[in-house]
Image (cartoon, rainbow, N blue to C red):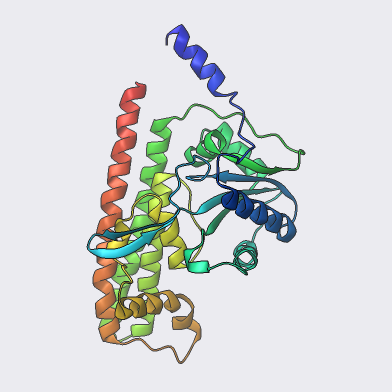
Amino acid sequence: MGFAKRIVGFFHNFVVMKRSTRFLPPRKRQDLQQLTALIREQVKQVEMVILFGSYAKNKYVDYDQRIEFGTPTYYMSDYDIVILTRKPIGAVEYSLYEKIKNRFFEDKNRPFHTHPQFVNYGIDDFNYALTKAHYFETEIKRDGVILYDSGAYKLARRRKLDYTEIRDRAQKYFDDKFGQANCFLEDTLFNIRKNLFAHSSFHLHQSAENFLRTIPMVFILYGHKSHDLSELMNAAKKHTTEIFKAFPRDTEEEKRLFDLLQRAYIESRYNPDFEITKEDIDALIPKIEQLRDIVEKVCRERIAYYDSQIKKQA
């Protein structure tokens, strides 16, 4: 390695994170101030709040209506926010997020206002990921903007990305999560033959959930824990909008089918009045199969990108 490259690599680890959002419009800054206050109010032992993603990079989309794959859709970037706490939040994590979102949207037009998306780490876990040059956490440290800092902790220095390790982890995640999703799809077909349509709908939900989870796990090596398909689609759309081919929700029937699939996670097991017909299952299966094909395509392309970066590092 030449002297110039060694110097660049040395200073790479000492870049100071941004702490100002003045590059954003006033309305966006007000939103982020409100969200930061709500996080500190609702979540215990908050040590840092960090904005990352498109808003931190000032490459966000405020509102874009377009035709995606023949389907009218609209796209808005989310406020992606990392909450670093003394210890991981744990079991109440997603209920706290819902409280924060509900308070945030009290005086706003929810469908057309920028949505927040939250990620939580215990600060020691986040620092460990930085020392191991994990892709997602390294990107947050590189591009993020600190919205709140208690001053009690320091973030570890980030290391240069090791694309061989990234590729290997992405491949493992793909094999595992994509494989699980396919197993759930096979279970669906087994249950149909026994006329167990509620069981079939649960396995279809689990198949869709795992296919959607696969995308961020391959792209940023991070697994979202939610069972909410809308939340998982919001997380996946940052990496590909092709998922809207499978679930366009552009007609009342499309909305009804997606709602059925969404509800199946809980109601197929716990609501004796939950009804789903063979016709509904037959309409949903091709959508899950289409989602499978999209996920396989975009994830294999991403893994091929890592391979290309390995060659550059050689």
| Residue 43 in sight in this render | yes
Residue 303, image x and y in percent? 32, 41
- Looking at the picture, does residue 130 appear above or below residue 267? above
Q: Quadrant of the N terminus?
A: top left
Which of these two is toward me, 70 or 214?
70
Q: How many marks?
A: 0
Residue 158, image x and y in percent? 56, 30
Residue 251 figure quarter: bottom left
Q: Is residue 25 left or right of residue 194?
A: right
Residue 275, image x and y in percent? 39, 89
- Looking at the picture, does residue 137 appear above or below residue 295? above
- Considering every residue shown, the one lying at the far front of the view is 26
- Looking at the picture, does residue 267 appear above or below residue 131? below
Q: Residue at x 61, y 55 (%)?
A: 31
Residue 62, image x and y in percent? 45, 53
Residue 157 figure quarter: top right
Q: Is residue 303 left or right of residue 156?
A: left
Which of these two is toward me, 200 or 285?
285
Q: Quadrant of the C terminus?
A: top left
| Residue 182 in sight in this render | no
Q: Residue at x 29, y 67 (%)?
A: 288
- Considering every residue shown, the one lying at the far bottom of the view is 273
Q: Residue at x 45, y 75 (%)?
A: 265
